[in-house]
């Protein structure tokens, strides 16, 4: 075959010998795609429609051996590397221009041991893959709230979902991982084996290697849950709804996790046509104890005003986990999501939230206030790399818009809204909603906390000194 034009780790262009590429491809058990292969264009599309990257080669790994070969090939040829789990990273880090993509989508197996309450999950599995298998046994791990998100990316940077107050974050339920590090070594990391690495991957993202398998602790959950989803009008007095929601959640059972969403009723067949586009405040909550108890406990959240729509009620746990899926379709819109941890929601912060919500750049743009606390905040900040465990809220600007002509203005709006709220925070973001991470080291230090960040840098120097894994919230291996 002809030589392949590639991008090297330092961003420069180079020509890679065709024979070397061919030998590498022939050795794989999975497949690999080059730009002129039929499936290439479909496979390079990831969730955020703003991402349009063209890798030189996409390696569709079928197992650990392919991952090891791909890591070794990339390192030996000094290639830029991206790692794709579920492809839902909003910053688009799962793809790269001109480099090599390690695509784990086919490694999506899930095996559950109901006796030990453990799940063994492939590095490319989606949340829905895992919930589907664990629910067979009435079990679940804490994950996120859109079932098409990848377990890997979500867990490695934390993982916030409807079980966060009851059972913590996804990374808190991790028991061990199998990982291929930058030198091509296969390792297992847990509390007892390579424990420094295990500390780092619980929050440190994709910085330390390619996780081929996750072992999760599972908890009895379902088969039914209770959803609370009243849609109140979003207007100048929306602050009263937010205050009442805040006060309710301050006292709420840890069986309940809740997000207050400021949005417009989506233009989607799931919603009555006459209401589509109406600006709303949704006091969304999920209770995962006994359903009768759930309906009783959640009732006050449904009586904070006159809802224009109320979708509350009992729902299968897998159903609630997939409830948002139809509204977050791959490639459909442009996206830029940026967050800030907040300790309190006082009158000033609420005023900013409401004024920004009334002035969103597009009806699809969503502002979410995640109420935190409970089990996730009982973990010591030093216990996992993630760091932040004190904040009571996460303010997330999930800016989404349809017309690429608005890219600049929508991103500028988000950055302004973020900067305006920053004085009310300690400056840390949830690294699964980091914008493009454009503030670099300053943002990472604020988000991990200085002690955890320094420890992460040491780990990066130990496990990835040449920064092979750099397309992520990158911890630079600087001595
Ligand atoms: C619609 C939507 C809903 C979301 N909802 C939630 C939510 O409820 N809760 C929440 O916490 N977050 C949520 N997120 C954020 C989500 O957790 C992150 O975007 C996360 O990066 C997605 O993981 P992924 O595997 O799908 O992404 P990918 O784009 O495939 O990967 C993201 C990064 O993770 C790393 N990575 C991926 N796989 C591996 C692996 N196997 N080994 C090593 N590194 C790997 C790489 O650095 C990669 O760049 C949501 C995002 C979207 C788009």
Image (tube, rainbow, N blue to C red):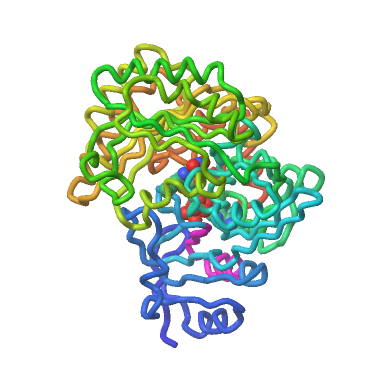
Query: Along the line of sight, which residue is nearer the eye, 386 or 100?
Result: 386
Q: Is residue 474 visible from the viewing direction of this image?
A: no
Residue farthest front in this picture = 292
Residue found 59% across the figure and 63% down from its top: 108
Instruction: From the viewer's perspective, tell me whether residue 356 is left or right of residue 425.
Output: left
Q: Position of residue 10 (x, y in %)?
A: 45, 57
- How many numbered marks, from 0 up? 0
Residue found 38% across the figure and 23% down from its top: 422
Above/below status of 411 relative to 346: below
Residue farthest bottom in this picture = 1
Q: Quadrant of residue 452?
A: top right
Q: Quadrant of residue 237?
A: top left
Above/below status of 194 relative to 342: below
Above/below status of 199 relative to 46: above
Query: Along the line of sight, which residue is nearer the eye, 445 or 188?
Result: 188
Q: Position of residue 116 (x, y in %)?
A: 80, 49
Screen quadrant of the C terminus: top right
Q: Quadrant of residue 374?
A: top right
Above/below status of 288 relative to 98: above
Screen quadrant of the N terminus: bottom left
Instruction: From the viewer's perspective, tell me whether residue 192 is left or right of residue 420.
Output: right
Q: Is residue 71 magenta?
A: yes
Q: Position of residue 112 (x, y in %)?
A: 72, 56
Q: Is residue 102 magenta?
A: no
Query: Along the line of sight, which residue is nearer the eye, 247 or 99?
Result: 247
Q: Is residue 277 visible from the viewing direction of this image?
A: yes
Residue found 63% across the figure and 34% down from its top: 290
Residue farthest left in this picture = 405
Question: Over which residues does the magenta segment extend?
Answer: 69-85
Q: Position of residue 162 (x, y in %)?
A: 55, 37
């Amino acid at each position: 075959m002809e030589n392949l034009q590639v991008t090297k780790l330092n961003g420069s262009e180079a020509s890679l010998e065709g024979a070397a590429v061919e030998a590498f491809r022939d050795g794989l058990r999975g497949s690999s795609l080059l730009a002129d292969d039929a499936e290439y264009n479909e496979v390079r599309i990831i969730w955020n429609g703003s991402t349009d990257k063209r890798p030189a080669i996409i390696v569709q790994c079928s197992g650990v051996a392919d991952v090891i070969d791909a890591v070794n090939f990339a390192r030996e040829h000094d290639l830029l590397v991206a790692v794709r789990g579920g492809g839902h990273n909003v910053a688009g880090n799962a793809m790269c221009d001109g480099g090599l993509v390690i695509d784990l989508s086919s490694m999506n197996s899930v095996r559950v041991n109901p006796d030990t309450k453990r799940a063994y999950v492939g590095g490319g599995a989606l949340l829905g893959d895992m919930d589907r298998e664990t629910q067979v046994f009435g079990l679940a791990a804490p994950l996120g709230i859109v079932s098409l998100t990848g377990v890997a990316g979500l867990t490695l940077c934390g993982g916030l979902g409807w079980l966060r107050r009851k059972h913590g974050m996804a990374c808190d339920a991790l028991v061990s991982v199998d990982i291929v590090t930058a030198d091509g070594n296969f390792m297992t990391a847990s509390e007892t084996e390579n424990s420094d690495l295990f500390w780092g991957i619980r929050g440190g993202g994709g910085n330390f290697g390619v996780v081929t398998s996750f072992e999760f602790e599972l908890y009895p959950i379902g088969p039914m849950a209770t959803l609370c989803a009243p849609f109140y009008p979003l207007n100048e007095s929306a602050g009263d709804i937010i205050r009442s929601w805040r006060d309710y959640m301050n006292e709420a059972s840890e069986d309940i996790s809740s997000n207050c969403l400021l949005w417009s009723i989506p233009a989607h067949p799931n919603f009555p046509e006459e209401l589509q586009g109406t600006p709303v405040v949704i006091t969304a909550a999920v209770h995962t104890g006994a359903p009768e108890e759930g309906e009783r406990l959640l009732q006050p959240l449904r009586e904070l005003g006159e809802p224009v729509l109320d979708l509350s009620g009992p729902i299968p746990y897998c159903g609630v986990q997939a409830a948002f899926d139809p509204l977050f379709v791959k490639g459909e819109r442009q996206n830029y999501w940026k967050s800030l941890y907040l300790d309190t929601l006082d009158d000033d912060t609420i005023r900013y939230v409401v004024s920004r919500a009334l002035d969103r750049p597009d009806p699809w743009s969503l502002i979410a206030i995640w109420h935190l606390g409970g089990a996730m905040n009982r973990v010591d900040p030093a216990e996992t790399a993630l760091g932040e465990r004190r904040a009571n809220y996460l303010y997330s600007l999930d800016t989404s818009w349809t017309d690429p002509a608005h890219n600049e203005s929508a991103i500028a709006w988000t950055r302004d809204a973020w900067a305006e709220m920053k004085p009310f925070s300690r400056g840390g973001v949830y690294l699964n909603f980091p914008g493009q991470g454009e503030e670099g080291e300053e943002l990472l230090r604020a988000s991990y906390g200085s002690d955890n960040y320094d420890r992460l840098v040491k780990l990066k120097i130990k496990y990835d000194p040449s920064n092979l894994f750099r397309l992520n919230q990158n911890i630079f291996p600087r001595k």
